[in-house]
Amino acid sequence: MVFNIVVAFVIPWLAGIFLVKKDFRLFLLIAPFAAFVAVIFDVLGFHFDFWRIDPEYDTEPIAALPMYFGVYPILTGYLFLTLERQSFHPFVVILFFSLITTIIEGIGVWIHLVHYSNGWTIYWTYVSYFLAYIVCYGYYRLLKKYVPL
C-alpha cells in the first residue's frame, strides 16, 4: 500500500503543485468531481470483477484510494488547464489524456499491481478513461455556463 500512496498520490501531487499554482480555482472546481467519477467507475469495475488492485482488501476500493485523490484529479486538472490555455479541439485533448492515463495503468498491469479479468483489457481501459473524461468534460462545460472561470 505504501507503493500505491507514493506512486499514485505523492508523485502526482508533486506534479500537481504547478497546476494548483497556475489555476487554483479551476482545480478546486474540477478535482472533487474527477475523484467522484473515478470512484464510480472503479466501484463498477470492482463489482463486475473486471479488475483488482494490489494489495487486496475485503473492500476493493481501499487500494485505489491514492489514485482517487491523486493521479485522477491531477490529470483531470491538467486536462482542463490544457483546454483553457491551448486551442486544440477538446476531443483531441481528451483522446490524448485518455491515452496518457491508460499508459499509466498499463504500467500498473505490467508490474502486476493491476490485474484484469472477465474479458477486460487495456483497450477497454482506454474506453473507460475516455468515457470518464467525457463525463468530466460535460461537468466542465456546465461549470463554464454557470460559474465564471
Image (cartoon, rainbow, N blue to C red):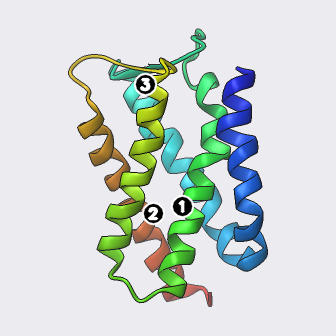
Q: Is 25 in front, or is 139?
A: 25
Horizontal and vertical percent position of residue 58? 58, 9
Residue in the image at 41% along x and 89% along y: 87
Which of discs 1 and 3 lies nearer the camera? The answer is: 3
| Tag 1: amino acid | Thr
Q: Is residue 33 left or right of residue 51?
A: right
Which of discs 3 and 2 lies nearer the camera? The answer is: 3
Choose the circle earlier in sequence order: 1 or 3.
1
- Distance between the Cα atoms at labels 3 and 2? 27 Å
Which of discs 1 and 2 lies nearer the camera? The answer is: 1
The answer to whether mark 1 and mark 2 are in CB contact below 8 A is yes
Residue in the image at 56% along x and 57% along y: 75
Horizontal and vertical percent position of residue 114? 46, 23
**Residue assigned mark 2:** 136
**Residue assigned mark 3:** 110
Horizontal and vertical percent position of residue 144? 51, 85
Q: Is residue 72 left or right of residue 98?
A: right
| Tag 3: amino acid | Trp
**Residue assigned mark 1:** 76
Residue in the image at 42% along x and 60% along y: 97
In the figure, 100 relative to 140: above or below? above
Q: Is 60 in front, or is 23?
A: 23
**Within 10 Å of the Cα at label 2, are there few (<14), some (14-19), or many (20+) other Cα atoms?**
many
